[in-house]
Amino acid sequence: MNILEKTEIIKNHELTALENLEQYNKEIDRKNSSLNIYLETDYDQARETAVNIDNRIKNGESVGKLAGMVIGVKSNINVEDFHITAASRTLENYLGSYNATVVNRIKEEDGIIIGVTNMDEFAAGSSTETSYFGPTENPAAPGRIPGGSSGGSAAAVAAQICDLSIGSDTGGSIRNPASHCGVMGYKPTYGAVSRQGLLDLAMSLDQIGPFASDAGGIALMLDIMAGFDDRECTTINWELPQFTELTSDAPDSLKGMRLGVVKQFLEVSDEAIVNIIEDSINKMEEAGAEVVELSFDYVDLCLPTYYLINYVEFFSATRKYDGRKYGYKIEDVCGEEVLRRIHIGSYISQKEYSGKYYKKALQARSLIRKEITRLLKDVDSIVGPTVPKLPHKLGTSLEPMEMYAYDTLTVIANLAGIPAASMKAGEVNGIPVGLQFQAKPLEDGKIVQLMAAYEALD
């Protein structure tokens, strides 16, 4: 049963919202202590919402598009009355006093928020190992990292302890764990979804997006989350596609699609991953897509550009965590990776260094965006690996640059502000491998079409 079918079954009262919630609650009780996915749940509040939905359905009243769907929220997105810690000791006692715009939109459509999910501390990581509350296990590849920083949200879908979840993506933090956990994850065009209520990592790069087990679930969440928000200055007032309708033509929508394959994206990826990605591309070509080879000469420039911008914006964003208004002073209690980013950000923010590092990084970003725009000009989407290497075993000691290498192929979409998504392409020795789609700004619907089309090929 896919997500869209399930919503109809609940609306027809063949399955009640309460029954759906109780099934997930049992699974959470059974699995969460070993997987460490949810940092906090509130069954009582969720039950109240489910009973209300069921009563309205029984009485013939209208209900929202998400009626009865059980949803997990990353711990850096504000949900009223939950501890919103960003997985840091800094905010371990901070109770959300309001809902982020995306959370309000989910609740308005009768989605049931079951809890907040684990993540890398302040989203500074690619493995969900930097969480103050301990690492999350990968349900799809036991003993390995789930990816990060939205590892808990991806793992929640993979472990089947929610219908849908949301995370944030600054340089791949939705797509990376989606790839490692074998689920679908979507980063919208920058500004397509409101960031209001998100705890910043790097404000010029951050986007909130959904996870799901199928393309219909991604489309449904985008129908609800996307759109202008007058309380958030980066949102775009754009003509929204009907995302769920775009999934109905699969797999026919591959016919005539032009897919760009960047040879350098394959060259920097492990051979076993490349083999799976090439098989996926061949399948789409057989289904009617046209495949075009592209070249991008700036792969090596992308990671340093991304991290220099990230360091400066993260340092700026963390100045409010000074221990006066709420929480502890961040530098006194945070983990090693967060402290590293604060110190480097502080250093390169100084007047004498900003021209040497930060301003040059902004120039490089403009170059990368220009080149990606050129590559996308004559294709509908760029397709390739999401992550260039397989997830490591939990507890493996990596140097910072080894960890950052997970982001090699995902930071590009954030630097260019374009939409991108990951979905499962196959497995290497039982470990999921993600296929990434990238498209022109505000052509989010095209990626949803491609995800649904590829899903229908299996």
Image: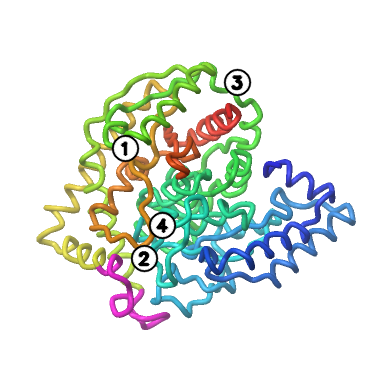
**Discs 3/1, front:** 1
Name the disc covering residue 320, or none: none
Question: Can you say whether 392 is above or below 252 in the image?
Answer: below
Q: In this view, does 158 lie to the left or right of 386?
A: right
Residue in the image at 62% along x and 36% along y: 242
First in residue order: circle 3 vs circle 1: 3
Task: Name, please, the residue furthest toward the right.
Answer: 59
> What residue is disc 1 on?
270
Residue toward you, 196 or 170: 170
- Front one among 420 and 158: 158
Mark 2, secondary structure of its residue: loop
**Image point (44%, 34%), residue name:** 437
Circle 1: residue type? Asp
Answer with the quarter of the image where residue 44 lies.
Answer: bottom right
- Percent position (x, y) of residue 79? 56, 67
C-alpha gap between disc 2 and disc 3: 43 Å
**Disc nearer the start of the sequence (1/4):** 4
In the picture of the structure, the residue carrying the numbered disc 3 is 252
Q: Residues within 10 Å of mark 1 (few under 14, many from 20)?
A: some
Task: Identify the residue under disc 2.
Answer: 130
Give residue 178's position: percent from left, percent from top.
48, 47
Counting the numbered discs, the total is 4
- Residue named by callout 4: 149
Mark 1: which secondary structure?
Answer: loop
For label 4, the SS is: loop
Provide the residue span drawn in magenta: 321-339
In front of the other: label 1 or label 4? 1
